[in-house]
Amino acid sequence: MMCLESDGAGTAGSGSQDCMPGAEDGGVETLSGRMSPVPTILERKSPEIHKDNLDKDHVPNIRRANVAAAGILSVGNVLNYLDRYTVAGVLLDIQQHFGVKDSGAGLLQTVFICSFMVAAPIFGYLGDRFNRKVILSCGIFFWSAVTFSSSFIPKQYFWLLVLSRGLVGIGEASYSTIAPTIIGDLFTKNTRTLMLSVFYFAIPLGSGLGYITGSSVKQVAGDWRWALRVSPVLGMITGSLILIFVPIAKRGHVEQLKARSSWFRDMKALLKNRSYVFSSLATSTVSFATGALGMWIPLYLYRAQVVQKTVEPCNFGPCSNKDSLIFGAITCITGFLGVITGAGATKWCRLKTQRADPLVCAVGMLGSAIFICLVFVAAKSSSIAAYICIFAGETLLFSNWAITADMLMYVVIPTRRATAVALQSFTSHLLGDAGSPYLIGFISDLIQESTNKTPLWEFLSLGYALMLCPFVVVLGGMFFLATALYFLEDLAKAEQQEPCSDSFTVGSCSDSEEASIL
């Protein structure tokens, strides 16, 4: 209550106080009328001061809407990776149909990733400045149309199939670059970690479903081309749902920071952020391994069974799809277990050390490398033992995906996050899966050319080429350990960003998309 000391005769020496009218709500009554209080600097800086004035009934509705939006974005991520790995699920049939060797088959994924890699920084720039959900939807519509059209390419035009995969990569780059930043602006702290975990669980889930969808649809339809016609239909539906239900999130809405800086200043700041640089290099090693293993492991296990004489060689399609189905199921399960294991281990380790995030990633990478090595030891004599090693190795490898994304959100301010995600995506693909599928196929062909072309050497040559993966994974573990050295320092720098001091510039700091140019 705001009271003034009375100077009237009746109160002389009494020390009593009379409250002025309107003081109860902070107002002051004057002769000319009532004056409202002037907001303090603290009130201007902290919108939370006035949160009690919000309609509390609307808060749960907003939360449910945000969770639903994150769910739709996660479904879209599932479809991105389902489409990407459908080709791997029918790779042997594509080789038989178009008459290409291992290096030619690996080129499909390499061209896809190269176009994805080049387009990612462009969409990162656009995502920090224009309407993000429109960009996402247009990207989904584009790759869906291209994928559907590619299912009608004649067998004498393999180059056209390669080109179509490059165009699909451009469409999918818009999604992978921008969608995580929307989730980052809808949630904070532990809730954001949970939602990003769900979003990145979509990567192994979608990859596994890609193998399963490709092989199952081919078996039912009797033609591998039908496998390329499933994801486009689902993509069109998901793109429409994003346009309708995903809210126009404000950049940094829950973390009121400085106004956006120039692109060159953003890039300079990111390159000086050592946690970001080392974690991006570590992510590149993960991409290298997942790209190579995801493309070649089903075919490698098929060749192992030919050597074991448990299956007959396939010279004409349609070929056996058992290994793609099993590998797809393992990828789905290990993706779920990896995300849960990584999130749980990080939450527990945060009670022990503030460097928990990069340390958990490092342990996961080093453990994964051991089991990946054992795959090639076990495959020649026992497919079951090989599948067990794949299960353990993938679980540990997938445990770091959501954690890496969450680390980026902690050490990079919101107005730079789309650019940071795009640059990290570019780097990880450039040094990772842009070249690893083709490189493995090229090494395999090179070994086969210097030996007898027998089922045994087809199996061994691909295995020797794939042995490169565990060594790259160990290197990734080293990069995560380097990240741990600088993580706290970069985290403190991000948290020291000053909020807007002018209440009239809050909109520019949060950078609402409502005024964006479509």
Image (spheres, helix red, strand yellow):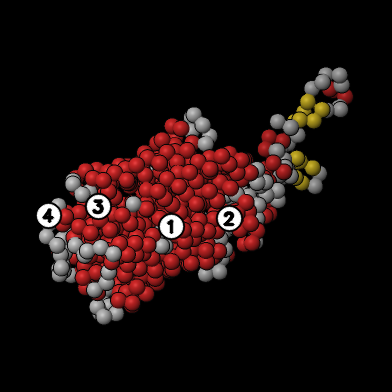
**At 32% across and 43% down in the image, what residue appears?**
371
Horizontal side of 170 relative to 211 (left or right) equals right
The mark nearer the N terminus, 1 or 2, is: 2
Please, what is the three-letter code of the amino acid marked with disc 3? Answer: Phe
Please, what is the three-letter code of the amino acid marked with disc 4? Answer: Lys
* In front: label 1 or label 2: 1
Where is residue 398 drawn, in percent x and y?
37, 46
Q: Is residue 490 visible?
A: yes
**At 28% across and 66% down in the image, what residue appears?**
449
* In front: label 3 or label 4: 4
Marks 1 and 4 sit apart, C-alpha to C-alpha, by 34 Å
Marks 1 and 3 sit apart, C-alpha to C-alpha, by 21 Å
**At 43% across and 52% down in the image, what residue appears?**
285
* In front: label 2 or label 4: 4
Marks 3 and 4 sit apart, C-alpha to C-alpha, by 20 Å
Please, what is the three-letter code of the amino acid marked with disc 2? Answer: Arg
The mark nearer the N terminus, 2 or 3, is: 3
Horizontal side of 451 relative to 369 (left or right) equals left
Marks 1 and 2 sit apart, C-alpha to C-alpha, by 23 Å
The residue lying toward the viewer, choosing from 26 and 45, is 45
Question: Label 1 crowding class (10 Å Cα cut-off): few <14, some 14-19, many 20+?
Answer: many
Q: Is residue 143 visible?
A: no
Q: Which structural element holds mark 1?
A: loop
Where is residue 369 drawn, in percent x and y?
37, 44
The mark nearer the N terminus, 2 or 4, is: 4
The residue singled out by tag 1 in the image is 432
